[in-house]
């Protein structure tokens, strides 16, 4: 399965097959409507925009991240006012735990969280 995405490069936004069909490197962007989501690509920075949530939803981080890889997860439309976004570390931990829960209290309406892979696990930055 492939996901249409845009990649930000020095040349601007470029279309890319997130299944690995292109060698363009940059920042992958995913817009997810009311579903759980597994980030399909390792070793590339990514932003996941969650919207239209009707229940708590889970974003699972890539299984084989590279040291320094950054992932940003954003509540695009204020869904955190009624539902949480659970970030699962997959094969790695997030600040020593298996998951991290984005809530309205922590992040505010339309909040976001940034994570970086340290080589030993994910860290909330």
Image (cartoon, rainbow, N blue to C red):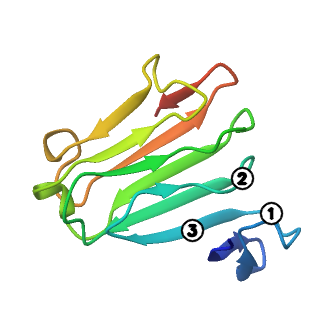
- Give neighbour class at mark 2: few <14, some 14-19, many 20+ (Cα, 10 Å): some
- Please state the horizontal and vertical placement of residue 28, each as a whole percent of the image: 64, 65
Location of residue 13 with respect to 62 vertically, above or below: below
- Please state the horizontal and vertical placement of residue 81, each as a whole percent of the image: 11, 57
CB-based contact (under 8 Å), mark 2 and mark 1: yes
Label 2: which secondary element: loop
Q: Residue furthest front?
A: 1
Left or right, 82 with reference to 37: left
Q: Residue at x 17, y 54 (%)?
A: 83
Residue assigned mark 3: 29
- Please state the horizontal and vertical placement of residue 115, each as a whole percent of the image: 50, 39
Label 3: which secondary element: strand
Left or right, 2 with reference to 102: right
Q: Which callout, 2 or 3, points at the residue further toward the start of the chain?
A: 3
Q: Residue at x 63, y 74 (%)?
A: 3
- Give neighbour class at mark 3: few <14, some 14-19, many 20+ (Cα, 10 Å): many
- In the rendered image, the quadrant that contains the N terminus is bottom right
Residue assigned mark 1: 25
Location of residue 113 with respect to 18 vertically, above or below: above
Image quadrant of residue 78?
bottom left
Q: Which mark is residue 86?
A: none
Q: Residue at x 13, y 41 (%)?
A: 105
Q: Residue furthest right?
A: 23
Q: Residue at x 47, y 58 (%)?
A: 37
Q: What whole-number distance in Å separates the C-alpha atoms at marks 1 and 3? A: 12 Å
Q: Which callout, 2 or 1, points at the residue further toward the start of the chain?
A: 1
Residue assigned mark 2: 44
Please tell me which residue lies in front, 124 or 81: 81
């Amino acid at each position: 399965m492939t996901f249409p995405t845009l990649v930000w490069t020095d040349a601007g936004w470029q279309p890319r097959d997130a299944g690995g069909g292109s060698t363009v490197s940059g920042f992958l962007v995913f817009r997810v409507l009311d579903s759980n989501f597994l980030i399909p690509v390792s070793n590339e920075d990514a932003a996941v925009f969650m919207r239209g949530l009707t229940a708590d939803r889970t974003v699972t981080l890539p299984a084989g991240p590279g040291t320094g890889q950054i992932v940003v997860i954003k509540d695009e439309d204020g869904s955190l006012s009624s539902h949480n976004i659970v970030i699962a570390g997959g094969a790695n931990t997030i600040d020593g735990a298996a998951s991290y829960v984005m809530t309205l209290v922590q992040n505010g309406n339309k909040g976001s969280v940034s994570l970086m892979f340290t080589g030993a696990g994910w860290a909330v930055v």
